[in-house]
Amino acid sequence: MQNFSDPAILFFVFGILAGSLKSNLEIPPQISRFLSLYLLMALGLKGGFALAQSGMTGEVLVSLGAALGMATLVPMLGYLVLRRFLNGFDSAAIAATYGSVSAVTFITAVQYLDSHGIAFGGHMAAAMALMESPAIVLAVVLANHARQKAAATVQPGGAAAGSQSRR
């Protein structure tokens, strides 16, 4: 029950409640941008300091490599599965969403581990920061591939390949 006293969890529950009640509560875009930048800066600095403190040991390199591998593998597999049901653009967007790391989930997990006295590597904040890029880059590459594929199926007259134009 003590986990519900965590501010991140409370804000999450409050957001679900506000959405369920169809509240017109809105955070101004400037504040939302500031909070996003603050969160990213705080995590980046924390990860950088932890990485500098622990040094680049073999364990750290393996952890960072595994993080980058998973951050690449998840969106690619997600795209391949989703492509069976959705168009290329939607598949790329959803795959990137699920391949990207949730900073809020990471912070909640870190707070949970801290509150229960469970030790973890401080370099994990650096791993989380590294994991953001592959999903975003893959989404752009996959969406570009879908755009090129769609353009290749359109004939010069504007009709899709395989369709007959009426004269």
Image (cartoon, rainbow, N blue to C red):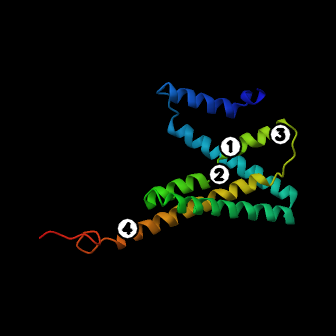
Which residue lies under the disc numbered 4?
Answer: 150
Identified at 62% across, 46% down, the residue is 37
Compared across the picture, whether 95 is left or right of 62 comes to left
Callout 2: helix, strand or loop?
Answer: loop
Q: Earlier in the sequence, mark 1 or mark 4?
A: 1
The 10 Å Cα crowd at callout 3, few under 14, some 14 to 19, many 20 or more, is: few
Q: Quadrant of residue 154?
A: bottom left
Query: Which of the labelled discs sits on residue 114, or is there none?
Result: 3
Residue 32 x %, y %? 56, 39
- Give the CA separation, mark 1 to mark 4: 36 Å
Which residue lies under the disc numbered 2?
Answer: 101
Compared across the picture, whether 117 is left or right of 90 comes to right
Which amino acid does the dot numbered 1 rest on?
Answer: Thr
Q: Earlier in the sequence, mark 1 or mark 3?
A: 1
Callout 4: helix, strand or loop?
Answer: helix
Residue 121 x %, y %? 84, 52
Q: Earlier in the sequence, mark 2 or mark 3?
A: 2
The 10 Å Cα crowd at callout 1, few under 14, some 14 to 19, many 20 or more, is: few
Q: Quadrant of residue 63?
A: bottom right
Q: Are marks 1 and 2 in contact (CB under 8 Å)?
A: yes
- Which numbered mark, 3 or 4, is in the foreground of this view? 4
Q: Earlier in the sequence, mark 4 or mark 2?
A: 2
Q: Nearer the viewer, residue 17 or 28?
A: 17
Residue 21 x %, y %? 50, 24
Q: Nearer the viewer, residue 6 or 78?
A: 78
Which residue lies under the disc numbered 1?
Answer: 105
Identified at 75% across, 65% down, the residue is 65
Compared across the picture, whether 4 is left or right of 160 comes to right
